[in-house]
Each structure stands twice: as C-alpha cells, then as structure tokens.
Amino acid sequence: MKHGLKWETLLRSKLFWAVVAELLILLVGFIIRPDFLNIQIRTLEDGTRVLFGTPIDILNRSSEITIIAMGMTLVLALGGTDISVGALVAVSGAIALKFLRWDVLVYTTPGDYTVMPFAYALLVPLAVCTLMGLFNGTLVARLKIQPIIATLILMVGGRGIAQIVTNGKQFTTQYTPFKFIGNGSILGIPLPIIITLVVVVAMLVFVRRTSYGMFVEAVGINPNASRVSGLRSGVIIMIAYIITGLLSGVSGLIYASRISSNDSNNAGLGYEMDAILAVVIGGTSMTGGKFTLVGTMVGSIIIRTITTLVLYFGIVSEAIMAFKALIIAGVIVLQSEPVRNAIAKRRDRKRLLMGGEARV
C-alpha cells in the first residue's frame, strides 16, 4: 500500500513528468542519431583535455537560461514576471566590453588588453544589473505597478542603455581571462556548466536553508493573508527582482565571453520567454505559490535539448521557435492537473481491479 501511495504521488509530480519528457526527447535523439548521447574526452591544441559530446553541449549552451531561470522562478512564485532579463543580458555584456576590450586605435596587433582592471569588467556589470533589478522590484512592490508593465520599461530601455554605453559600437576582446569564462574548462568540464551548478546550489541553499523560500510561497499563495500575518511582502518581492537582475548580469557575462564581443541587438534576445517556459515546464505555477528550482533546471535543459534536436532534423533556424512551441505545449499539457490526475486515477482503478481479482 505504501508503495502504491508513493507511486501515485510520483505520478502527480510535475517534476517527474518533466524528467520523463527530457528522457523521451533524448530517446528520440538517440533513435535519429545513435551517437547523440556519446560523451568523449578530446585533447585540444594546447593540451587541455575536455569533455565533448551532445549532452555536454546541451548542458553548456543551456547555462545562460538556467541561471536566469533561477531568479525567474522566485518572481513567478510570487505571482509576478520579469520580461526585462534579456535586455539586462545585453547591458551586462556591453558594460563588460566597455571596460575590457581590444582597441584597434591603440594597438595595431591583437593581444591581451584591458582598459580597466579585470575586476571592474566583472563587478560593474553585476552591480548595474542588480540596481536594475532593484528598479524593477521598486516599481512592482512599492508603486504597485503590474509586473509585466514595470519590467517592460527596462525590456525596451535596456537595449538602448547598452547602445549608449558602447556609443552604438560593437567591441571585441582577446583578453584570455575573460574569454575563459564562457569558453574555458576545469577538469574537462566547461566552465559555464560549473558556474551554473554553483548558482543552482547557492539558490537551493538560500531558499531552503533560510526562511526566504517559505516566505516566497506564503506571499505567492495568498499575499493578503501573509501581509496580515506580519510578513513584509514588499521586501520579499524586491529581493526576488534583485536576485533576477544579478543573475541576468551573470548570464550576460557568460554570453559576452562566448562571443568575445558585445551584441546589444541580439544578446539575450528571447531569453525572457525561454526562462519563463523553463520555470513553467519545471513545475512552478505562473499564478504563484510552490516552486521548484531543480524542476526549473530540468525545464531549461528540455528547452535546449529541443533546440538541438530540431537542428538535427535539418529544420531551418527560422522555424525552430514554432517547432519548439509545439513540443513545449505538449509537455505542459502532460503536466496539467487534469491529465496527471486522469493518469493517476486510471492507475488506481487498474490496481483496484487487480486487487479484486486476486481476492477472488
């Protein structure tokens, strides 16, 4: 009986169905290409040994969305949303490359060149994005502006700020330490994957080892009741937006490091939708309440796996969003309450029939 209850609980879990969906997608990839799940160790020209393969590439390329989605999970759990994260990615990369670039006017040959100390190129973008998160949080928590309207301001204005920072120019850099962030590896594991794991673990510790996670769920489920009980819901909401801004800055640094350049027009484009989808697929409701960071990470990996699989099908890049939307819609339907309850009830009915036959 206990095992039956455990299985029923598992079937009703959104995280369980997200994992099942990812395994099915990987199975499809394996059927299409038998080497889809292969992982190899390759030696680069400089002698560095790195892990190589489609699964590693999926984890690596999903890093930016996963990091942003960690903060987005808190925002959605509070019943809000943040559509400015993509613009903050562009702002972070623009500021970093403003401080850290190869300037052809100064040097005639490429080389390592920093305008300011390397720490400035990392800390200033993070500080600015954190302040932008504070700005969003203030509009939502203090001025009571609808979250989608409040964050729309920076969604539109953020890319303009990125253009102002760089005077509309696109800088490049050959500075090795900066390029290492998005392209380097430690013990064969790509550094973006390590950074993502650190962020996920830090967020898990923060929300589960402190009372903040419980406060987020309380405010998300019933803001009025939590306010009456003495919770400072405004502060809790502001912290969520601040964290989202900070993590968007981290994602922006990784993105800029990958391409060794700033791209204010394309950096972070569509990240807000992918982050929201990752959170929803992972099992967090957009209406607020309970949330799961592990589920969000799985959701982000699903989105990247779908993108990789679509490319293997030979579908043109312009159609990827439409194809991705169809698959994600199916995943969300599988996770919906009626479908999960129907599957669980069908299994209960089957178990009861088998039990009756056994007694006879």
Image (tube, rainbow, N blue to C red):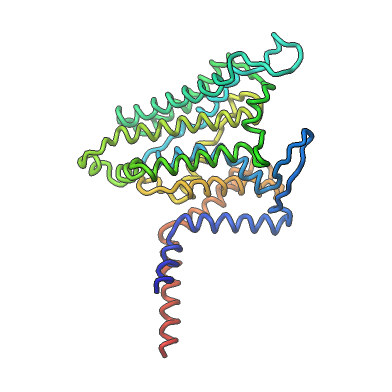
Q: Residue furthest bottom?
A: 360
Image check: 111 left or right of 279? right
In the rendered image, the vertical position of residue 214 relative to residue 9, given as above or below: above
What residue is drawn where x is 44% and y is 58%?
13
In the rendered image, the vertical position of residue 176 relative to residue 56, given as above or below: above
**Residue 65 falls in image quadrant:** top right
Q: Position of residue 8 (x, y in %)?
A: 42, 67
Q: Position of residue 194 (x, y in %)?
A: 58, 39
In the rendered image, the vertical position of residue 204 relative to residue 263, given as above or below: below
Quarter containing the N terminus = bottom left
What residue is drawn where x is 71% and y is 56%?
32
Q: Residue furthest right?
A: 45
Q: Residue furthest left?
A: 228
What residue is drawn where x is 54% and y is 19%?
120
Instruction: Name the residue nearer the viewer: 12 or 119.
Output: 119
Using the rendered image of the protein, determine whether residue 95 is visible from the camera's viewpoint: no
Quarter containing the C terminus = bottom left
**Residue 108 falls in image quadrant:** top right
